[in-house]
């Protein structure tokens, strides 16, 4: 039998030493108003600063705080997954540690959950403190993803900030694929869902953990995890290239036959060859992305490794985390 935990709050954290104290304070302030049992499940994703030590200080004086301490950085989506694996609440809330997603929205999510919704996701109506480039690329990403994943309703302008019911969390535990796009997986498992709107705040302190390179990787994960359309588009693009090559060939032959000059056809011929080579490389890149994912799945490595696994097991048997 599990502990009487009503709410589990999963907080992934990576190098958040500058903000983690304020995150804890605001989460405690919000959760206390609910007057029901809860746990704060911090996941330290291999931080190189004092994040883990600060959280251990919370746990030493606050029994509601649990720490999952990764052996290295496994990534934000894996950190969320680990939190779901250990969460014990009837409702599970996912929120980042940087306070861009305000904890004060959590009671609104819980109100919707109490009305019978099994997934309550937070939709960003405004994005404060972000560059025009970040807002524009995010806007385009969600709409391109929607267009490429017609069979799965992934909500627009939503991140991982959401509440999921116990049954949704249990379903997510059974999904162990390596290249994870959690918000897409939550949509894939189904269940009754609704949205609440909120204003995404400027980061409280520290630096973003999603620079351009990681944003691109995350976008590829989202598309490749839920759509085969890039492979189909490659075939369509091939037909276009073949048609363009045929037109170029006609132009070359016309120049040779009527201009009596072989020199004038070299520039368009080279351009056509470069176009064809570029197309081949693009197709190989798309195929490589999907083949690489197959390779990742066949290795069957664990999604993450915990530095404090034995400590958690001891707590489990002592009934600190939950009793059986």
Image: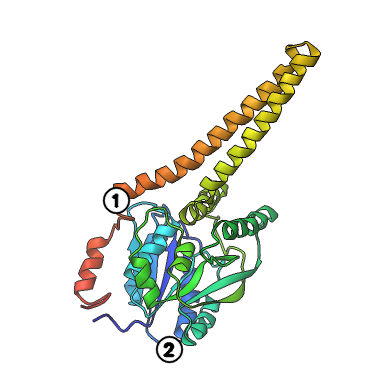
**Where residue 91 sits in the image (x, y, percent)?**
41, 79
Q: Residue 83 — which label?
A: none
Q: Which residue is mark 2?
A: 35
**Where residue 35 sits in the image (x, y, percent)?**
43, 89
Secondary-structure class at tag 2: loop
Q: Residue at x 73, y 18 (%)?
A: 265
Q: Is residue 43 left or right of residue 98?
A: left
Q: Residue 301 — which label?
A: 1
**Where residue 99 sits in the image (x, y, percent)?**
54, 67
Residue furthest front as drawn: 257
Q: Residues within 10 Å of mark 1 (few under 14, many from 20)?
A: few
Q: Is residue 102 visible?
A: no
Q: Residue at x 41, y 55 (%)?
A: 47
Secondary-structure class at tag 1: loop
Q: Quadrant of residue 128?
A: bottom right
Q: Residue at x 56, y 72 (%)?
A: 122
Q: Which residue is nearer to you in this view: 147 or 303?
A: 147
**Where residue 95 sits in the image (x, y, percent)?**
48, 69
Q: Which residue is nearer to you in this view: 91 or 210?
A: 91
Q: How is the image coloured?
A: rainbow
Q: Earlier in the sequence, mark 2 or mark 1?
A: 2
Residue furthest right as drawn: 259
Label 2 vs label 1: CA separation?
41 Å
């Amino acid at each position: 039998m599990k502990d009487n935990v009503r709410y589990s709050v999963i907080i992934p954290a990576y190098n958040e030493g500058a903000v983690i104290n304020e995150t804890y304070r605001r989460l405690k302030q919000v959760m206390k108003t609910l007057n029901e049992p809860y746990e704060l499940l911090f996941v330290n994703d291999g931080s190189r600063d004092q994040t883990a030590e600060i959280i251990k200080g919370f746990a030493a004086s606050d029994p509601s705080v649990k720490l999952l301490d990764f052996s290295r950085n496994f990534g934000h989506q894996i950190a969320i997954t680990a939190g779901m694996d250990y969460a014990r609440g009837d409702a599970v809330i996912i929120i980042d540690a940087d306070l861009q997603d305000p904890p004060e929205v959590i009671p609104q999510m819980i109100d919707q959950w109490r009305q019978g919704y099994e997934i309550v996701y937070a939709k960003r109506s405004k994005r404060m403190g972000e560059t025009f480039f970040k807002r524009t690329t995010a806007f385009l990403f969600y709409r391109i993803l929607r267009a490429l994943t017609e069979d799965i309703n992934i909500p627009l302008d939503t991140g991982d900030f959401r509440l999921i019911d116990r049954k949704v969390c249990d379903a997510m535990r059974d999904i162990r694929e390596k290249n994870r796009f959690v918000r897409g997986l939550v949509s894939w498992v189904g269940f009754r869902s609704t949205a609440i709107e909120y204003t995404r705040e400027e980061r409280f302190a520290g630096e973003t953990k999603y620079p351009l390179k990681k944003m691109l990787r995350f976008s590829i994960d989202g598309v490749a995890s839920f759509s085969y359309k890039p492979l189909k588009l490659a075939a369509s693009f091939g037909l276009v290239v073949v048609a363009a090559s045929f037109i170029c060939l006609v132009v070359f032959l016309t120049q040779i036959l009527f201009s009596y000059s072989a020199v004038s056809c070299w520039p368009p011929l080279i351009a056509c060859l470069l176009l064809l080579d570029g197309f081949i490389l693009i197709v190989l890149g798309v195929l490589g992305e999907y083949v690489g994912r197959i390779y990742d799945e066949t290795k069957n490595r664990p999604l993450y490794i915990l530095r404090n696994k034995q400590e958690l097991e001891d707590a489990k048997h002592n009934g600190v985390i939950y009793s059986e």
